[in-house]
Amino acid sequence: MFTGIIEELGTVQKLDTLKDSARLTVQANKVLIGSQIGDSIAVNGVCLTVTDRSNSSFSVDIMFETLQKTNLYELKNHSNVNLERALQLQTRLGGHLVSGHVDGTGRIASIHKTGIANIYEIHTSKNITHYLLPKGSVAVDGISLTLVDIEEDRFTVSLIPHTFAHTTLGFKGPGSTVNLETDLIGKYVAKFLNPEKDLGKKDITLDYLSQHGFID
């Protein structure tokens, strides 16, 4: 689990793309402290397992499914990446609960400045926006951000200067792809309220609950 509070920007040293997988090596400093082989590090919001490390870098293996569902395949040598170590129980939860299991991607449509804030409009699918709430949280490339406006196929988030200067979003412009993870608790609540929805069945109703013995 992660918080979406980025600890540092890493630099891609090498991305070896194989037939059904990839191996990524990232130069870093802070996230290496206390990290061992087998630990999890979120790279642009994707939870990955450290398979090798040195005093200045770490390596991870990326499965085919992860390459399909995230923007990691776009990385090149010297690309910047957001890095965060897995949270510990005594860590302040400054962002929100982030699993590192990306739900899909979006594309930055526009960026404009309002006061000190940079407002990003991101286009994505209905499967993503379905789980978004105004003033709720979303992880964008692993960054915990507060939602401003939400429409059927897009949403906006606001970045303070610190986030703009210390994450990959400060380097990305319109047309760039971002990894998206919706709020973990929201997804569980939606699943509990409509457990049969994914199977193509009707939503839970009072009649349904009565028929199945949940209420008299």
Image: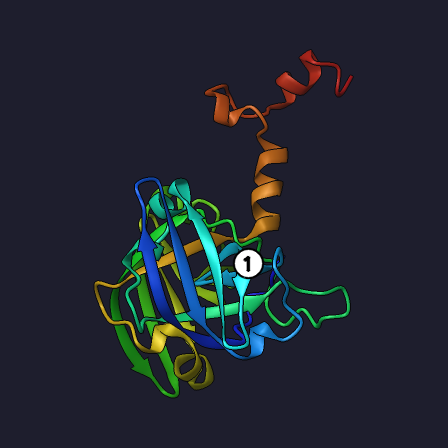
Please name whichever residue, 74 or 160, is drawn nearer the observer in this view of the structure.
74
Quarter assignment of residue 27: bottom left
Q: Quadrant of the C terminus?
A: top right
Residue 32 x %, y %: 58, 73
Q: Secondary structure at mark 1?
A: strand
Badge 1 amino acid: Val
Q: Is 202 displayed left or right of 164 in the figure? A: right
Q: Is 127 displayed left or right of 134 in the figure? A: left
Q: Which residue is mark 1?
A: 50
Residue 206 x %, y %: 64, 22
In this rendering, is residue 77 above or below 185? below
| Residue farthest top in this picture | 211
Q: Quadrant of the N terminus?
A: bottom right
Please name whichever residue, 126 or 32, is drawn nearer the observer in this view of the structure.
32
In this rendering, is residue 12 above or below 39? below
Q: Residue at x 30, y 82 (%)?
A: 113
Q: Is residue 134 visible?
A: no
Quarter assignment of residue 170: bottom left
Residue 190 x %, y %: 57, 39
Q: Is 89 displayed left or right of 41 in the figure? A: right
Q: Is 139 displayed left or right of 154 in the figure? A: right
In this rendering, is residue 167 above or below 50? below
Q: Residue at x 31, y 65 (%)?
A: 121
